[in-house]
Amino acid sequence: MFSFELIAQSTKDRARAGVIRTSHGVVETPVFMPVGTRGSVKSVSPEELLAAGARIILGNTYHLYLRPGCDVIRRFAGLHRFMHWDGPILTDSGGFQVFSLAKLAKISGEGVTFQSHLDGSSHLLTPEKSIEIQTCLDSDIVMCLDDCIQYPATREDSWEALEITTEWAQRSKRTWQETQTGRNALFGIVQGGMFRDLRKRSAEELMEIDFPGYAVGGLSVGEPAEVMLEMADYTLPTLPETKPRYIMSVGIPENLIELVALGADMFDCVLPTRNARNGQMFTHYGTINISNAQYKEDTEPLEPGCECYTCRHYSRAYLRHLYMARELLAYRLNTIHNIHFFISFMKQIREAILANEFESFRKAFYRKLEN
Amino acid sequence: MFSFELIAQSTKDRARAGVIRTSHGVVETPVFMPVGTRGSVKSVSPEELLAAGARIILGNTYHLYLRPGCDVIRRFAGLHRFMHWDGPILTDSGGFQVFSLAKLAKISGEGVTFQSHLDGSSHLLTPEKSIEIQTCLDSDIVMCLDDCIQYPATREDSWEALEITTEWAQRSKRTWQETQTGRNALFGIVQGGMFRDLRKRSAEELMEIDFPGYAVGGLSVGEPAEVMLEMADYTLPTLPETKPRYIMSVGIPENLIELVALGADMFDCVLPTRNARNGQMFTHYGTINISNAQYKEDTEPLEPGCECYTCRHYSRAYLRHLYMARELLAYRLNTIHNIHFFISFMKQIREAILANEFESFRKAFYRKLEN
C-alpha cells in the first residue's frame, strides 16, 4: 500500500504540502529523512528519532547488503524489526555508493561489478539484484538502480548514464511487477547530469515506465549550488504533479527551502548527522561550532527556545565539554539537536504552505539567518 | 544531610542491607555505582541510567578539575545540573588518578604535585584543594585525598602511604568542618597495602578522626582476587557497623557477591561500562563476547528474560552488527545492558538479604554461572 495526496499548493510559487501513506505509517511532506546508513541513524535510538520528529528514515542498500547481509536481515523479516524502527523506511538502490565508495566499479550489460570497500570481495549489482535486496529489507520506498556519474561529466557521459539508468529502471519495474505484493512502492531516479535537455529526456523516459514517485538524482555531487538549483528548477516541473518528488542527498537549510519553493517534497542528507559529530550545530541564526572557546562557560542551550531533548536539558558549556573530551554522549546530543532542527524546519515550512504563507516564511527565515 | 540506616543483617554471614539518605535522594544498599568519569557515564544519558536502575553515580575529581574545570561547573552550582543528573553523586578525591594517570606525581609535605595527562601543565593537589574541588562539584559523598601506592608494595612503602593518608584525612576533616554546611558527607579511605596489621591501623586512625562512612581503597590494583578478598575480609569488620562501607573499584560479579558476604555496602567499577564498549556483555550465565560469529544470525536478546532497554528491543544479531560496524549506538546499547545487569544483580542480592536468603542466593548464583 502506497499513496500520495497533495493537500496544499502555494499560490506564489511551486511549494506544496502532501501526505504519503505507506504500510508502516503516514508521512507529511515536505519531509526530511535522516540517514541510517547501516541500520542505525548514527548515535541515536529509534525513540530519539521519533521524539525529534522523524517519521521516515533512510537505509543504504549497498552497506546493508555487504554487512550484515540479507541472510541476517531476512531472519527479522526486514530492516524494521532488525533495527527496532516501526516507521516507514526508504532505501537507496546502492548505485550511488557503488560508484563513490566501492572500488573498481565497472558497468557491464548486466549491471555493475564492484569490489567491497570492506574486504575487497567482488560483487555484481544488477537492477534485479537491487530490488531483491531492498525487498529483503522490506523497504517501504524502494529506489531503482541508477548510473551515478561524477561531476563534472561530459554531455556524452551524461547521456550514456541516462540511457543506462532508463534501461535499468525498465528492468527494475519488470522485476518489481513479477515479485511484489503491492505493499511497497518503487521510485524512478532522474539522471542527465547538468544538461537541461538530458534531464527532461530522463524524466520523460521514466514517466513512460510509470512510477508512484520520482527522485532527482545526481545532484549535490560537487556542482555549485546555483547549478544544483537550476537543474532542480528545470527538472521538477517535468515530473507529474500527483506524484511525490524526491531530491536526493541535498543539503543545507537554505537549499532545502529553495527546493521546496521549486516543488520538491522529500529530502535526505547526512549533513545534520555528520556535522553534529563534527561539532557543527544548526540553529535559526546560523551554525555554531560547539568547540569554540566562547561557549566554555555558556549556560544557555544551543538554541534558546528549541524544544529538542538536548536543548531542554543541556547547556552549550556541557556540550562543549563533552565534545572536547570526545565523550560518546556528545555525538548523540549533537545529533538529536541537528535532526530536530531539520525536521522542525520542514514542519514549519509545511505549516506555512498550509496557511499559504510560504513566501513570507521564506523571507523571515533569511532575515533571521542573516541576523 | 546524610544518614545511613542498617535495615537487615544476614544471620549466616556478614551481608547487610541498608539505606543511605542524601540531599539528592535515597540509595538502597548494597549498591553498585556506575562511573561517570568526566561528567558522563560513557555513552548513556541520565534517563537511561535511571531506567537501568542506577540511583547514585561517580564523578572523578581529577578529570573534572582538569577539564572543564571548577570555573565552568561553578556556573551550574555543581555537577548535578551541569550533567543533568538529579540523583546523588559520589566523587573520588583525585588521589588514585594522580598516582596512576598523571605524570611525575610527587608527594611533598603539602600534598602531591603532578603534571596533567592532557597538556603536561603542573598542578598541586592537597587534601584541602581536593575538598574545595569536590565542594564546587557539590558531591553528595566526598572522599578524602589518599596516598594510593602501586602493587606490589613493600611494608615500608605501605606504612608510609598509610601515615600520609591519615594525615591527609585529618586535614580533610578540618577543612570540611570549616567550610561545609552539612549538606554532604565526607568519607575516609582505609589504606595499608596488603598488610593486615597496617589495614587495621589505618582503619583505627580514621575512626579516631570519625567519618560518616568509610571506604577501603588500594584494592583491585593488580593483586590476586584471593588477596583482595582476604584484605577486605580482614578490614571490613574493623569498621563501625553503623556506617556505610565502600569497597573502591571492584569488580566482577563474583567478587561483588563475596564482598557483600563480607559486609560491604557500596561498590563502583568501570568494568560494566568499559567492557560494554569492548563488546563483553555480562549475563547470569557468564560473559558473552558479542563480536563472536555465533551471534551473527541470533534473533534472541543478549539475555532472554532481561528487562533492560537493550534486551527488550534488540537481538544479539543486531548488537553484533552494530559492534562490527563500529556504530556509535553499539556502545550505548551494550552499556545499558551491562549497567542494568550490575544494578539488578545488586537488587537481587539486597532482596535476598532482606528475606534472609542471601546464602542460598549466592549458591544459586554460582550454579547458574557454572551452567
Image (cartoon, coloured by chain):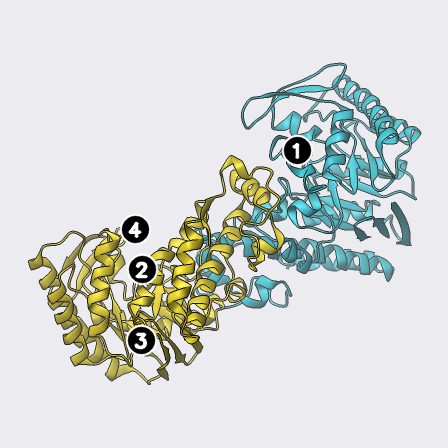
Chain colours: A cyan, B yellow
Q: Say whether mark 2 and mark 4 are on the same chain.
A: yes
- From the top left corner, tell me how far across and down residue A293 is, in percent: 44, 57
Q: CA distance from mark 2 to mark 1?
A: 43 Å
Q: Say whether mark 3 and mark 2 are on the same chain.
A: yes
Q: How many numbered callouts?
A: 4
Q: Residue at x 80, y 57 (%)?
A: A350
Circle number at residue B244: 3
Q: Mark 4, mark 2: which one is toward the viewer?
A: 2
Tell whether label 1 touches label 4 (CB within 8 Å).
Answer: no
* Residue that carries the numbered disc 1 in the rendered image: A71
Q: CA distance from mark 3 to mark 1?
A: 53 Å
Q: How many C-alpha atoms fall within 10 Å of the one at disc 1: few (<14), some, or many (≥20)?
A: few
* Residue that carries the numbered disc 4 in the rendered image: B119
Q: Mark 4, mark 1: which one is toward the viewer?
A: 1
Q: Secondary structure at mark 3?
A: loop
Q: How many C-alpha atoms fall within 10 Å of the one at disc 2: few (<14), some, or many (≥20)?
A: some
* Type of amino acid at the residue the image marks with label 3: Pro
* Residue that carries the numbered disc 2 in the rendered image: B249
Is A27 positioned to the left or the right of A9 in the image? left
Q: Secondary structure at mark 2?
A: loop
User: Residue B305's image quarter?
Assistant: bottom right
Residue A16 visible in the shown view: no
* Type of amino acid at the residue the image marks with label 4: Asp
Q: Looking at the image, tell me whether mark 4 or mark 3 is earlier in sequence order.
A: 4
Q: How many C-alpha atoms fall within 10 Å of the one at disc 4: few (<14), some, or many (≥20)?
A: few
Q: Say whether mark 1 and mark 2 are on the same chain.
A: no
- From the top left corner, tell me how far across and down residue B185 is, in percent: 32, 78
User: Disc 4 sits on a residue from what chain?
Assistant: B
